[in-house]
Image: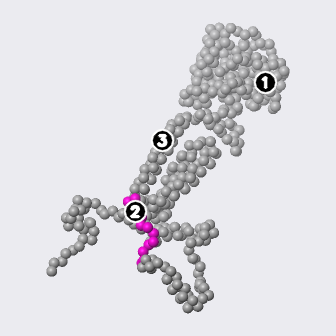
Amino acid sequence: MTAQATPRDDDASAAEGGPTATSSSSAPLTDRVNVEPPILNGMTASEAKLVAVVAFAWWSLCGLVLAFLLSTWQVVIAFAIPGTVVTVWMVSTKLATIKRNRPDGYHRQAIHMWLAKRGLRSPMFITHHGHWELGRTWIARLTFQVALVAELPLNHLLTPLSMSTHPPIDALKSAREENKMLRYINVGVFLMSAIGMYLVHELPAHVTLHVAPNLRAGDQISIKDGRNEVPAPNVYAFAIYIWQQVNRWPKNGAKDYETQLFAFQSYLTPACYEQLRNDREARNNNGELIQRTRSLSQIPGQAYTSNRIVPDGANAWTVLLDMHVFETARGVPVKDTYVRYPMRVVEYDIDREKNPFQLALDCFGGNKPERLDPSAVGAAKPLAGVAAPLPPTQASQASAPSVPSQALPPPLTLPRDPVDQPTRP
């Protein structure tokens, strides 16, 4: 008697050289399973979709709130994409821990029980602990069970109770749907990344931030196109510092004037630099700078006030500086007077290594300096709520400050400061 082994499946017939021997190197693919297989740690494809949608909506909402507070909507992309990826990964690891050594569908039933216990949805399971009694005798219960069985169809009675009534899941179709979803996700991430890189490319490479010295708690600084509005105290401080340094001749004006102009040329507009350079050449040709010293200092009591800054067009200001001018020639004092300089300050786009403030002096603009009477200089101090004291070329008789001023000489043909004429006792 000959025993013949019957192959159990196609793989066995392939191993014996059957007609499916060409596919013996590939593992068998189960095309029908009763549960959905996990694709990421302990997370299935449908769970990954649900978690990704919820996480993307949540992180987008958080990004919108932060973008509204920071006035930068690019924060939405920075929150939505990384937050979704991190959330999906963390939930998948948590699901792997929850599902370990537990039956299929345990976590779904646990979530349902948690919601039903708190009244968030109607319960689908009986959770009552105790004895149940219908109030009938055993004969009535037996009669009811027999009648119930008689009403059931025959094929239902013959169905094994252990078989699942749910239709089987097509694993191959599920894998194809999963791959299709992943392709859509990859395309979406690529498009959002491209948009994000374009927006980052459009952002300014440098940001110039001017912080006011009187910054208070709760103050906000708005930046537009890489710049913020220059506070008035910063404009005043810049004007008085640069103008003091340009007019600082400690030993010999013939050399110091040129040295200071060269050192601070990045803080002067080209027109202002040319005007001061011509003034220096004219003074030097007349012999006025030999052994001449000069210094400027702020008049005591004439410090910064808000009405000393007068707007003069877009990104330009006229700063009123009340300065004490002191000069000597060969050790002899030749000038000791008070002068109001209407310095024009403009925003100046230049190399930040040479001028980090991005501001420049434009000399006097269309105004002229004014000499103040030392005996009445206290009246020149701007008061709160009073209009800013404009130079004589712009202020009317009604708005001009009531400060006695000395008669000035007629304007010179050279671009020189008329108050810089030496005054001898």
Tell me the residue that label 1 is attached to.
Answer: 389
* Mark 1 closeness class: few <14, some 14–19, many ≥20 residues within 10 Å: many
The residue furthest left is 1
* Residue 41 visible in the picture: no
The tag on residue 170 is 2
Q: Which mark's residue is nearer the viewer, 3 or 2?
A: 2
In the image, is residue 265 part of the stretch drawn in magenta?
Answer: no
Image quarter in which the N terminus is found: bottom left
Q: Which mark's residue is nearer the viewer, 1 or 3?
A: 3
Mark 3 or 2 closer to N-term?
Answer: 2
Q: Gap in Å between the C-alphas at discs 3 and 2?
A: 36 Å
* Mark 3 closeness class: few <14, some 14–19, many ≥20 residues within 10 Å: few
The quadrant where residue 370 appears: top right
Name the residue: 21% across, 62% down: 19
Q: Which amino acid does label 3 sit on?
A: Ala
Q: What residue type is labelled 2?
A: Asp
Residue 96 in percent (x, y) is at 46, 65
Mark 1: secondary structure? loop
* Mark 2 closeness class: few <14, some 14–19, many ≥20 residues within 10 Å: some
Residue range highlighted in magenta: 159-173
Residue 301 in percent (x, y) is at 78, 29
Q: Which amino acid does label 1 sit on?
A: Pro
Name the residue: 68% across, 36% down: 212
Tell me the residue that label 3 is attached to.
Answer: 194
